Amino acid sequence: MRQETSALSRLITPRRAGTVALAAAGTAIFAALGLPLPFLFGPMFACLFAALLGAPLQGIKPVSEGARTILGVAVGATITPEVMHQIPQMAGSVAFVPIYIAVIGLVGVPYFHKVCGFDLATSYFAAMPGGLQDMILFGKEAGGDVRALSLIHATRVLVIVTIVPAVLIWIFDRPLVQPIGAPASELPLTELAIMAAAAIGGWKLAQRIGLFGAAILGPMIVTAALSLTGIIEHRPPREAILGAQFFIGMGIGAGYVGVTLSELRRIVLAGMVFVVILAFLTFGVTEIVVLLGLASPVEGFLSFAPGGQAEMTVLAIVAGADLGFIVVHHLLRLVLVILGAPIFAAAMGLRSRER
């Protein structure tokens, strides 16, 4: 009992409790003002502004990772036999994913290296549209600037998560009002228990085998198997998905703790300009796949918007988009970047400075 109390006290520190309280206040303000996605944007912007003002915020990494397992289950639950039958029809738009990644690299690396003045290793991994943690890890191994990589990728996710809803509402006329899930009281208890087991078990199993993005991909794979066999027929309950939004938003905002004015001017601004470049590339590839009849405008846009997988999942759900279609594209992007980025880095002669 004493050990459990000690572990709990280490997890819930005053700084973390204050961060959660601030995030909750942001959620309440956004909800009261009727702003979209209050459980995502409220915590994100409240913590972002407080972090930039120097507040000593601290996220709760185990809880944030646990929240991502909920979205992994949500994605897995959408992978039904009907979705599997549609995969051949996605081949045309999926074929654009590697081309899209290559163009991002060809534009992004020179931008960060020649225009912004970062070293080649930092420029390369800053340009790659992969997962934040993976790109930081690979960049560190290649001798890149870990702080710069952290801020650039955090800025990419922050800005994309901010502008994508506005694009959906004002350009595609798609209000973000779709139900994110049924309340827990309406779901069978046995199915809730199975989903909880899939979330935790899939996460831990994926961690053990070293799978990238374990918190999302592990639960997604396990739940997809359960969905394909008819054991699971629902997404996680509304309360769980709202909780996932809350902790993901809080984590994004709190990631800016300790940012200096110099870093804002040089690194964060460089990241924001890169997002503008990515926006043009995203709209370009979306226009192509839509004109070719390979995707509808909303699905095409969300499939190629280079945000984080968890954040894009939330936006796809509330926009009522084809989640299976979108997830296939994002999974391929992440797999290609995570597998290919180290190979191309080695071919470019990028090696750790510690060797």
Image (spheres, rainbow, N blue to C red):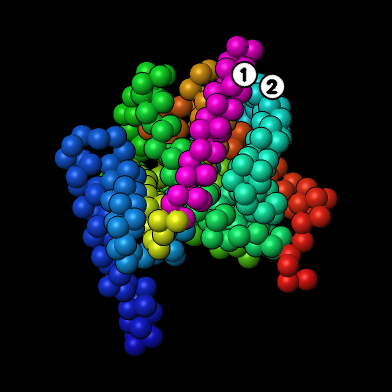
Can residue 281 be seen here? The reply is yes
Question: Which of the 4 image quadrants contains residue 170?
Answer: top left
Q: Residue at x 56, y 33 (%)?
A: 278
Q: Is 287 a magenta residue?
A: yes
Helix, strand or loop under label 1: helix
Question: What span is in magenta?
Answer: 263-292
Query: Could you tell whether 150 is left or right of 70 in the image?
Result: right
The front one of 288 and 354 is 354
| Residue 182 to residue 320: above or below | below
Check if mark 1's residue and mark 2's residue have beta carbons within 8 Å: yes
Q: Amino acid at mark 2?
A: Gly
Q: Position of residue 143 (x, y in %)?
A: 69, 62
Q: Is 166 a magenta residue?
A: no
Would you say the magenta stretch is mainly helix, strand or loop? helix
Residue denoted by label 2: 92
Question: Which of the 4 image quadrants contains residue 255?
Answer: bottom left
Residue 289 bears which disc, if any?
1
The front one of 265 and 169 is 265
